[in-house]
Image (cartoon, grey):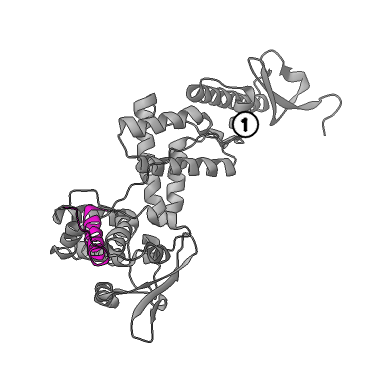
Amino acid sequence: MPSWNNPVYPIVGKIIIGRSIAQFGCKLKADARLWNVKSGRTIGKNKVATELNREINKINLSIHSHYKEILKWTGKVTALEVKNAFQGIATAQKTLLVFFEEIMQEFQSRKQSSYLQYVNTHKHLKRFLKDKYNVSDIPLSQLDLPFIGSFDFYLRIERKLKPASVNSVIVQLLSASRTALHRNLVSRPPFFGYKMERPVFQIRTLYTDEFGRLASTPLASKDLCFIRDLFVFTSFIGISYIDLKNLTWKEIITEEDGSLWISKSRQKTGIPFNVKLLDIPIRIIEKYREFSTDGFVFTICCLVKINILLKQIAKLCGIDRVLSFHISKHTFASQVCLSQGVPIENVSQMLGHTDIATTQRYADVNHEKIGNDMKQFSVRLATNFSFLPNN
């Protein structure tokens, strides 16, 4: 305890920037008789005074360093921000790309597909910051509505990405911003009020000649052959990548007549569906049966890698378009089913749609389908009606 003759008091720091003031405890104490108010230091050269002044100098240097750093990134700074940064309270000065890298590491060990998506978004953000602001990174506190608007414009106009690709990147940025908010790295939703532009739904299907080349072109690589077979399998089944990846042998049912059916629920909607396995899908299943593990019908890599390999396959098969795995679902709906006369109600049920209007988006009514329908219609008319022109 301090004596009345030599009182010792705790040292309180004060940060003043403009009109903002913040005080903090230094966890240091000084002899009142030796304290110089003007210099903010103790008087004397003894060991106690020297060590105390050294600690005060360290605090002073740290505060100035944080002040300069915040000012560099944001262009403005308050006393409270400097105090929080000095005391380690404000992790809000964590930067965007560093935070993205942390999220990437989290997903790398548990969800490879999400990891690759964050890697892609990180690449676009890094390039955007360099091209737009000529900086290597920015603090999370600098994110706001104009930032994401500029980023959106940059992806669409300068990088010339398609709307669906732009939305995929933006979704990752929005997800990261929500994570930052939940972890108290930002004090408010930085992109509140932003609305993504919904791309116009486009039918992406392989037509008869393209699908024929895809299914029959010899491929030397076993990996490419496997991915091609998965695409063909899905084109006859109409299930999504995640449902195919999680397809188990228990979900392949044998009916009394010996036919095989897939009976499961869509992971996306939870809606049950049933699809009969035709000859080609059965042959594909049997071809890879020996390689199946853990009860799954197929052992499948991530979707990003599949789509990369499909682009190589398209080139080898002479298909002049960007081929993705999702196109197999469109091909099932439009070419395998609707173009061959399968009622749209049945197709809707096999796809697991809750609304037939969703299925109608897949109904690619091409010239071949129109021609076949009109031929059949013409035959029915000829047998039911007659016409005798006047002389």
Question: Residue at image x 30%, y 33%?
Answer: 159
Secondary structure, mark 1, is helix
How many marks overall? 1
Q: Is residue 279 above or below residue 76?
A: below
- Can you see residue 306? yes
Question: Outermost residue toward the bottom?
Answer: 256
Q: Position of residue 99 (x, y in %)?
A: 47, 41
Q: Which residue occupies the foreground of this view, 287 or 173?
A: 287
Q: Which residue occupies the foreground of this view, 386 or 366?
A: 386
Q: Residue 127 sits in which quadrant? A: top left
Q: Is residue 384 magenta?
A: yes
- Can you see residue 109? no
In the shown orientation, is residue 82 left or right of residue 325? right
Q: Which residue occupies the foreground of this view, 205 or 384?
A: 384
Q: Which residue occupies the foreground of this view, 339 or 224?
A: 339
Question: Residue at image x 81%, y 25%?
Answer: 6
User: Which residue position is annotated with label 1?
Assistant: 84
